[in-house]
Amino acid sequence: MKIQNSVALVTGANRGIGRALVQELLASGAKRVYATARDIRTLKDLLETDGDRVKAVQLDITDRHQVAQVACNLRDVNLLINNAGVLSGVGVLNGPVEHMVQEMDTNHLGTLNMVRHFAGVIEENGGGAVVNLLTIIALASMPGFGAYSASKAAAWSMTQSIRAELKARNIEVYGVFPGAVDTDMIKDVQMPKTSPDEVAKAILAGVEAGTEDIFPDPMSQQLYEQWRRDHKAVERLLGAM
Ligand SMILES: NC(=O)c1ccc[n+]([C@@H]2O[C@H](COP(=O)([O-])OP(=O)(O)OC[C@H]3O[C@@H](n4cnc5c(N)ncnc54)[C@H](OP(=O)(O)O)[C@@H]3O)[C@@H](O)[C@H]2O)c1
């Protein structure tokens, strides 16, 4: 799909990868970008960059009523970028269940909720694309982040389902599997990280190229190659981290 002249909606646009995606969409010629966030005040800076093309919208993706309302109001969207996500950093055996519920509600069901409401909008506009931010640790679990991995693995499976179902409605579906990205989400994790700007550029390049599974940074590309050769070796590697 071409980014030029697209009408995009980005969830969790106020910081991290979401914010970088809004800037990259503007640089790539998007006609309009709906930058959405739970707290609309956090979008002030983005609005100042291009008030004509950026529209701020309040949106919590776990609020089904609000998602339905926003989809009713924004009838021109043809590129939905499901970026919003949470990471609690708990394992599945002993982590608080509330954290696991929040991760599943946001990363899987919140993302699905967006797709269910916007698929009809995109179809009415002649087709377009859905982009779901997953993670490289959806392919194999990192036990310290086990609950997060499980929620993103569910979102990956859902991404495959909707790809098959939405094809006939002229909607392309992309899954993005980043490695470590330098945002608030993993600010306390010490390891080499890629900048959100580079990741955003690679995501949009993948969408333009029609690459269904996008590995937007060196860590994810390397782990994916290893996983293709020997997925059990990657399971053991991440399992020991
Ligand atoms: N950073 C990484 O290393 C990495 C690696 C792989 C995948 N990812 C994925 O990439 C995406 C972006 O992550 P990031 O690194 O940019 O994280 P981040 O800096 O922590 O930003 C997360 C964004 O999601 C928003 N959000 C969380 N729950 C939400 C909800 N219920 N409704 C609407 N927005 C919500 C946050 O809003 P508030 O400001 O209101 O909290 C924030 O804007 C996520 O899906 C993440 O899982 C990140």
Image: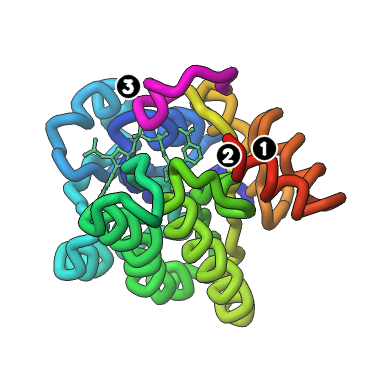
User: Spatial distance from mark 3 to mark 1, Cα to Cα?
Assistant: 31 Å
Kindly identify which numbered label has been placed on residue 220: 1
**Is label 2 in contact with label 3 (beta carbons under 8 Å)?**
no
Q: Secondary structure at mark 1?
A: helix
Residue at 55% from the left image edge and 19% from the top image edge: 191
Which span of residues is magenta-colored? 183-193
The amino acid type, in three-letter code, at marker 3 is Thr
Sooner in the amino-acid sequence: mark 2 or mark 3: 3
The foreground one among 103 and 67 is 103
Disc 1 marks which amino acid? Ser
Kindly tell me whether mark 2's CB lies below 8 Å from ligand 1. Answer: yes
The reply to whether discs 2 and 1 touch (Cβ–Cβ < 8 Å) is: yes
Is residue 225 depicted above or below 140 in this figure?
Answer: above
Q: In this view of the protein, which residue sits in the foreground, 225 or 7?
A: 225
Q: Residue at x 49, y 18 (%)?
A: 190
Q: Which residue is mark 2?
A: 178
Q: In whole angstroms, how far apart are the C-alphas of marks 2 and 1?
A: 6 Å
Q: Please, what secondary structure does the residue beneath circle 3 have?
A: helix
Q: Quadrant of residue 192?
A: top right
Does residue 99 show up magenta in the picture? Answer: no
